[in-house]
Amino acid sequence: MFFSRADVERRILDGENLIVFRGKLLRVSRSWLAKHPGGSLALLHFVGRDASDEIEAYHSESALKLLHNFIVGDVELDDNGFWLPFQPPVMSGWVTRPDGSWFNEAAPVTISETIPSEVLLVKAEDHTVPSPSMTTLKLPKSALSLNTQAQHSVAYRSLHQKIIDAGLYRTPYITGYGPEVVRYVFLAVGSAYAYRYNWLNLSAFLLGAMWHQLVFTVHDLGHMGVTHDWNKDRLISIFLADFVGGLSVGWWVENHNVHHLVTNHPSHDPDIEHLPFFAISPAFFQNLWSSYYKRTMPFDAFSKWVVSIQHKLFYVVLAFARFNLYRLSYVHMFQKAWDTERIRGGRWSWFLELTGLVFFWCWFGRLLYGCGSWQSALMYLLVSHITTSPLHVQIVLSHFSMSTDDLGVIESFPHRQLRTTSDVICHPSLQFLHGGLHLQVTHHLFPRLPRHNLRKASRLVKEFAKEQGLTYAEFGFREGNMDVIGVLKGVADQVKIMGTVAAAETREAVDKKNAAVQ
């Protein structure tokens, strides 16, 4: 069956979830949307778009073989064989209810006159319009060329094949994860030994160091980058994240998938939505709507005060960031208590995670109780958790200083990832401290790639970037920290300027009023 652009447009407005893949049209039913292992938003952000590169980057060969079950026909391409995308409804604030009816949760707002393609969201106040229109799906003007972006995509597919041919998807279990396991055991045994002899601060530090290191492997498992089997990777990750670390891997996977697909978008990427503590762009001054958290991110008086000194609070806030991960994990677990329709995992995965989280607080709570006094227990809690803070610094280094502009859905997958992501340069002997997260550019382009192969793959990616005229951003750890602090200070300065201008306008209004009275 053949579908013209008008056919696709009409069906999307009727509530169908249609995605283009290699010239074929995929239809995702509402029931499958709820079952998708990567979460529904991972699909909704690509309704009306060509998601070929993203689909192949995030799915194994066995998963790709299932796509024929969703193909409903061919689509109309332009003269060069490329698909001209529509703006996905969710990116304009439109979502469907369980009964299939439309709901306008947010409204588009234009902030930057210099970036016509930028579509940010604020909470919708007018709910009188029953459904999206052709205007909703209309592609915003973009400074990018569809042909150029399509050529980047073609070159990326060639690069991906080189990665496959080089055998870089094969996990180096012995040389890669062998040393990792030895390190984990050393830290665990060291922490237990120190605790036995009442060296509580040392024990807490070693426990925190183990958590810090385990997160990197959980990250790999969440991407199916270890055994490449969903069930095996998920079981191992639940043990490490939930039973040992007290965090929900289910929350992390759903959050992280969205981050990878809409990297650094102020309204859609949860990994940069950190108000009231951080704002990496003035766009957050507009009380933006988060399509992930389904709420407004208020830029209120408290947010203004904190953001005005965010560059000074940066390391202090990140020192306690693990406590926020607990909050996000447990909110997610509560919300998913009645949502058991995931095609993989479903109820057993949720119950296993819940069991793991209860188990964690039993053994960790017993550990704190055994410290002897509440002061010692508090110190043990703080030392163990603050020790993990370099992880949180590492995570934000690769994105906080990069572009947050929305160049539109016409932007190709490789162009978007190279524009919004950067590497941290480090010596190979120290890369275990970064856990592969220092090679974020290559990881974002090939998220399922085993992290111990990222360095080899990055050489191919750099060649690709040079050939395509794209920038491969990388910097040293210190330089990266300074760049992030600089971005935070720049936004903080704008908050102060806003306050100064507002105060001046208030004084002027009062003076005029007094003059009128006199």
Image (cartoon, rainbow, N blue to C red):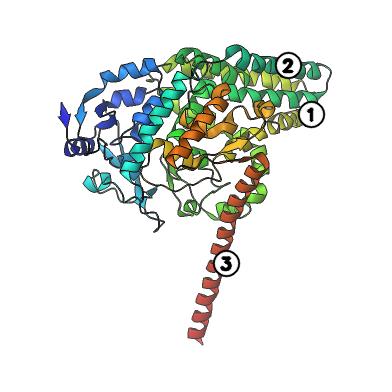
Q: Secondary structure under badge 2? A: helix
Q: Which mark is residue 376?
A: 1
Give neighbour class at mark 3: few <14, some 14-19, many 20+ (Cα, 10 Å). few
**Sequence-wise, which precedes: disc 3 or disc 1?**
1
- Residue shown at the point (38%, 25%) measured from the top left: 56
| Viewport quadrant of the N terminus | top left
User: How far apart in space, not on screen, are marks 3 and 2 (Cα)?
Assistant: 55 Å
Disc 2 residue type?
Answer: Phe
Residue 56, compared with residue 269, is above or below; it is above
User: How far apart in space, not on screen, are marks 3 and 1 (Cα)?
Assistant: 46 Å
Observer-nearest of 206 and 277: 206
Q: Is residue 215 left or right of residue 335?
A: right
Q: Position of residue 18 (x, y in %)?
A: 26, 31
Disc 1 residue type?
Answer: Ser
Q: Position of residue 27 (x, y in %)?
A: 25, 27
CB contact under 8 Å: marks 3 and 1 = no
Q: Which residue is label 3 attached to?
A: 500
Q: Secondary structure under badge 3? A: helix
Quarter of image, res 361: top right
Q: Position of residue 391 (x, y in %)?
A: 63, 32
Mark whose residue sits in front, 2 or 1: 2
Q: Is residue 464 left or right of residue 87?
A: right
Q: Secondary structure under badge 1? A: helix
- Residue shown at the point (44%, 19%) measured from the top left: 165
Residue 494, compared with residue 194, is above or below; it is below
Give neighbour class at mark 2: few <14, some 14-19, many 20+ (Cα, 10 Å). some
Observer-nearest of 128 and 316: 316
Mark whose residue sits in front, 3 or 1: 3
Q: Which mark is residue 186?
A: 2
- Residue shown at the point (35%, 25%) measured from the top left: 34
Question: Does residue 261 appear in the picture of this structure?
Answer: yes
Give neighbour class at mark 1: few <14, some 14-19, many 20+ (Cα, 10 Å). some
